[in-house]
Image (cartoon, rainbow, N blue to C red):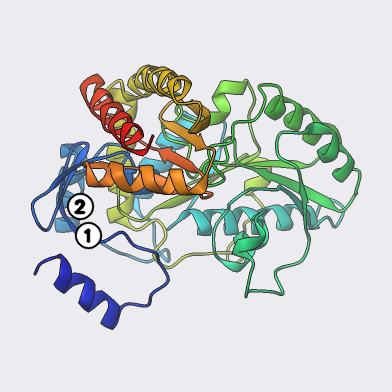
Amino acid sequence: MNTETVISKFQRYVINNYSRYPIVFVKGKGCWLWDIEGKKYLDFTTGIAVTNLGHSHPAVVKAIGEQSRRLIHVSNLFYVEPQVELAEILVKHSFADKVFFCNSGAEANESAIKLARRWGRVNGGRYKIVSALGSFHGRTLGALSATGQKRYHEGFKPLVGGFKFVPYGKLEPLGKALEDDKVCAVILEPIQGENGVIIPPEDYLPGVRELCTKRGVLLILDEVQVGLGRTGRLFAYEHYGIEPDVMTLAKALGGGIPAGAVLAREEVAIHLTPGSHGSTLGGNPLAMFSGCAVLRTILGDGLIDNAARMGEYLLERLKTLGRKHKELVKDVRGKGLILGIEFRSKEVAKEITRRCMEKGLLVILTQDKVIRLLPPLIVSREEVDYAVGKIQESFGEVC
């Protein structure tokens, strides 16, 4: 088939709930993708922070092949050996004592919400959860209710009750919200990725941790997008010298195989008792074995340091470019390998995105004005230079 045929069949058979670019990818290797027509692209989207090791990484390919020949699925009515292996790695490299496995970020956040309410029920009958304006926690009804963006709520009301919202990055409104003795938890993203790569002040998360501890409230960190090396640390909370009570992961966890996880302290985790929550496919052997390969590679191949180093280099190059084009660029920001270029107009942001793709560089347009860049953790200096060159060319054509 060719591009036109695939798109035609999609329009005939697939529900049209995505705005898709007219590209059909058929092969990937490292930081690069090839479409059905043979054109090559540098992938700075990583499937929205999923393929952190790049495409067809040998460790992931090997793990999937080996496990698929042994056992792909067995239900959680039985013990699953790769779950133990992956849980042990996660616990030994985080604050957590226990892990629950599911299939996606939305499921992980849904599970964390339920866990917080189970904990709150036996701790004063608390059930309310405070979230941030501009947040994105997923599209299941509970996770959607925790999402602080009205546009995602349209057509789905009434939402789940018990959620309240405060401005992101500000401690005073959060402190007032926590005066409500029915609040059981606060859920936050260390960086609001979907909202345009919004990075809070350095004292924000430490302040949130202090407020939650003072009020006896759980702190849930949604690291679905920014965890697993993306920010130049294994987990983003490590930048701030704090630890959450609960953390959610997904996206990069399975190396492209659907996988999600909720990590929690023992005293919180005990409230998910047998029968209280579950997932048929969550923690299946294939996803878990792939996840083990992902974590071991990130931890063992120097990729966290590479993410920090390449992220700093890319950020500086983009800031230099932004200073040269102040008429187009409002701000450039990032931490590790999650970066955003905020433009002054929606039209320019859209056009730069389109031109980058035409030139073989894949980026993400979010919030209409922000280009989000999510390079693989394996990205090289030469690939960063290539990307900046394509962005610079696009700027030159738009000016």
Q: Mark 2 points at which residue?
A: 67
Which of 136 and 345 lies nearest the eye of the viewer?
Answer: 345
**Label 2 crowd bin: few (<14), some (14–19), many (20+), radius 10 Å:** some
Q: Which of 196 and 264 is in front in this view?
A: 196
Q: Quadrant of residue 25?
A: bottom left
Say whether residue 376 is visible: no
Q: How many labels does the image show?
A: 2
Q: In the rendering, at what x and y percent does residue 304 appear?
A: 37, 23
Amino acid beneath label 1: Leu
Residue 267 as seen in the image, left or right of residue 367: right
- Report if residue 37 is visible in the image: yes
Q: Residue 71 carries which label?
A: 1
Point 57% across, 29% down: residue: 237
Looking at the image, the residue that sits furthest to the bottom is 12
- Mark 1 lies on a secondary structure that is loop
- Are the residues flagged by discs 2 and 1 in contact, CB closer than 8 Å? yes
Image quadrant in which you'd find residue 219: top right
Which residue is outermost to the front? Answer: 399
Report the front residue among 380 and 211.
Answer: 380
The residue at 61%/68% (across/down) is 141
The image quadrant where one finds the N terminus is bottom left
Residue 148 placement (x, y as % from top left):
67, 53
Crowd band around label 1 with a 10 angstrom C-alpha radius: few (<14), some (14–19), many (20+): few
- Where is residue 251 shown, x and y percent of the image? 41, 48
Q: Could you tell me how far apart the alpha carbons at marks 2 and 1 are, in whole angstroms?
A: 6 Å
Viewer-nearest residue: 71 or 378:
378
| Left or right: 299, with 220 as reference point | left
Quadrant (top left/top right/bottom left/bottom right) for the C terminus: top left
Q: In this view, does 368 lie above or below 150?
A: above
